[in-house]
Image: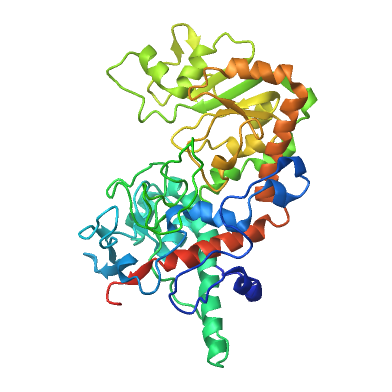
Amino acid sequence: MMLIRPQRQPSFLPIALFVTFCISSRVCLGEIEGGDADVDVLDYSRGKIRAHRFPSVASRIKLYMSNWYTPPCQDDNDGFFRYSYIDDDDNRWPKLEVTGLKDHPLVNQTTRIMNGIQSKVEPDMLFFMDEKTIMNCANYSYDEEWGEKIKDPYMKRIEFRHNMRMYCEDIQDLLLPAWYHLEFEKNLLHNNNNNEEVTTTVGPPPPPTLIQFGDNKQSHIYKDVMVPHIKKFPTNINVEIQRTALNSAHGNYRFQPIVWKLATDRHYKKLNDVYRYDTQWSHKKDMAVFRGQLTGSRDGYDKLLSDEENCHNLKRCRLVYNHGNSTLIHARLTSTRGRMPDVLNGVELVGGKVKIDTLLEYKGIIMIEGNDVASGLKWALLSQSIVLMPIPKHTSWCMEELLEPWVHYVPLDDFATNVEERMQWVVDHDEEAQRISERATLWMEDLVFHPDAAEDDRLIQEEILRRYQHHFLPADKQ
């Protein structure tokens, strides 16, 4: 199956006004027009207008790009990342070599070279995008036996195809069209400057697009990746001081990846179910519900400890164990992934999966982060229930770090030990709790369903790639 490039008429004039630099040459990129690109100061008391309650396009770009918002200037040769391609053993798919920043003021990477980066799609591994591999990953489903029979060359290029498909689909549907549009835009500008006939021919998107799929905070081989690359969520965020992007590509703290809208099937698919099955606030039970697998156990589980000790150290298990007899909290795991018994000291830990229409019968929905962002948070925010959760430690395209406690959700301590107390507050302050739920619903509607949401996403994604490419130079160019 071939990817059909979008046939829409590109809005070149708005894009030309949207940025403050000439895209025809490598220059130092400035701030985006439209005011200060720092995170907006939002006023929820005037929430009738989207601009008062939701971040602007400019501030979102800066938030998503973090350290990589401002590329090096044209004359800053030591600031670029140099890349070159290396022939692979089978001489079919090249490998990539990236040389780190030279004489970095804080992290000396003069001799740091990332060698042998492949275009092979696999979880938790940095790779560079090969368009045909991405399209094969996104569109073809077959077992290994069938694939071997036809000797499909892509069989060995895509590990865990079933799990990787949702990521590949997002790259195919969101990232590739953005690259195509930028290449078309560049060709149009070139042709107009030279009074040539406009052509729609575009080449492969340079430079190589570095990506990491999956939930792991680090790449298995390259560990902390100190080059611009695209990922579902940053490595971490400071929950005490709101993270803002730097004014330079060279940061003074751990370099963050560039946030992209990934795993949309898992994180956004159930939004429509909320509109289908949700019920009014006044009809919901005065209880909070939790369902989820025992994810997030990579750091807290120790096979040398007892089951009770391990359960105490794992946030989701501890939540369920401590509230087995609660009249306000109904919490169960859907799976312990083989690490815990289904019943511990008489407390039922596993309760099986529950459909979303049943979860929406509760006024409170508890969200606990697992390996990264809680995948159910988006539909819970959209619903007419109220979200109870610890302050997020991960952020994604949804900008979880900008959600405000007592504005969009009821905050819990890190292990949710005060969840019963906070759910009692919801019961005792019914009208205030309902207003919090309504603001959370507005956040998700502004992000996904507002008439401007799709165009905002397009502008943001294209500007991210425009700035991304200005961090790189081929190794043979000065």
Q: Who is closer to the viewer here, 181 or 265?
A: 181
Please tell me which residue is depicted at 34% across the width and 62% down the height of the picture.
153
Q: Is residue 469 above or below residue 353?
A: below
Q: Who is closer to the viewer here, 332 or 47?
A: 47
Please tell me which residue is depicted at 61% across the width and 22% down the height of the picture.
289
Left or right: 290 with respect to 427? left
Please tell me which residue is depicted at 32% across the width and 71% down the height of the picture.
77
Q: The C terminus lies in which quarter of the figure?
A: bottom left
Residue 56: quadrant of the picture = bottom right
Left or right: 143 with respect to 333? left
Left or right: 423 with respect to 312? right
Q: Who is closer to the viewer here, 347 or 387?
A: 387
Please tell me which residue is depicted at 54% across the width and 41% down the height of the picture.
401
Q: How is the image coloured?
A: rainbow
Q: Is residue 376 above or below residue 445?
A: above
Residue 210 x, y percent position in the rendering: 38, 59
Residue at the far bottom: name it.
Answer: 195
Residue 36 x, y percent position in the rendering: 59, 57
**Number of marks in picture:** 0
Residue 265 x, y percent position in the rendering: 56, 46
- On the question of residue 9 being in view, the answer is no
- On the question of residue 376 being in view, the answer is yes
Residue 227 x, y percent position in the rendering: 35, 57
Residue 367: quadrant of the picture = top right
